[in-house]
Image: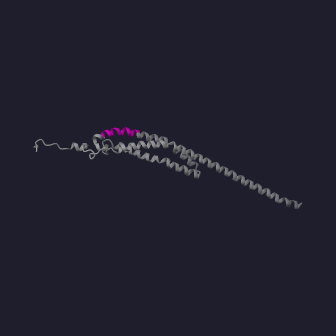
Amino acid sequence: MMFSGLRALPLCLLLITSSATFAACNTKSKADAAAKQSAAELKSSADAARQALQKFEAPIVELNAKYDTLHKEYSVLPADLPGFEDTRAQFFTAYVTLGQFSTKPVVLLQRIEAAQKSGDRAEFEAINRDIATIPAEIGILDKMALESLHKVIPLKKAAETYVPEALGQTACEDPKAAPAKQAANKKLPAKNARPQ
């Protein structure tokens, strides 16, 4: 009887070992499955954020084109043109703001990449909040561009009589295009001057 018990002991140990191995493998399989699911969810979140950003590429390019055109219009105006100082400051402030805003998608793409690698779900939520503000920011900058366009038109007309060179043609290119201030300062011949 004792020998029968001894013969059964290895079988029991084998069953226990097998059960423990199966449990460990089952736990590992579940962990691997959870990790794969988590990686898939992170990739899905990253792809969705990238697609959301891609929608704003064309509007941002168009906005930059508007400001580049306006920049050329404002740059040729004389800095001392009456009524130009405040308008000029407002435009160039908006122009600088656009430059900073245009880097936002690049920064967000870097954050998306980092959040996917680190598995930071909270960062994805923050990224999505930042992406959601882009349409409103584009709208504000577009409105400022339209206002700047309306303001520059009368300034260009004023500059035509104030300093002709400001519109691109200098006195050196056209000798007849003398500045208004110089023309006004030309001396008239004296009444009693004798003809020579």
Location of the C terminus (image quadrant): top left
How many numbered marks, from 0 up?
A: 0
Q: Residue furthest right?
A: 1
84 or 152: nearer the viewer: 152
Q: Quadrant of the N terminus?
A: bottom right
159 magenta-colored = no
Residue 93 percent coordinates (x, y): 40, 45
Asked if residue 185 is positioned above or below residue 3 in the image, the reply reads: above
**Picture coordinates of residue 105, whole percent (x, y):** 50, 47
- What is the basis of the colouring in this image? one colour
x 38%, y 42%: residue = 70
The residue at the point 81 percent across, 57 percent down is: 12
Which image quadrant is residue 171 in? top left
Whole-percent x, y for residue 71 in the image: 38, 44
Q: Main secondary structure of the magenta part?
A: helix
Relative to 86, say whether 21 is above or below: below
Residue 86 vs residue 26: left or right? left
Q: Where does the magenta region start and end?
A: 146-158
Question: Residue 149 in magenta?
Answer: yes
Horizontally, residue 196 falls left or right of residue 34, namely left
- The quarter of the picture where residue 67 lies is top left
Residue 134: image x %, image y %? 49, 43
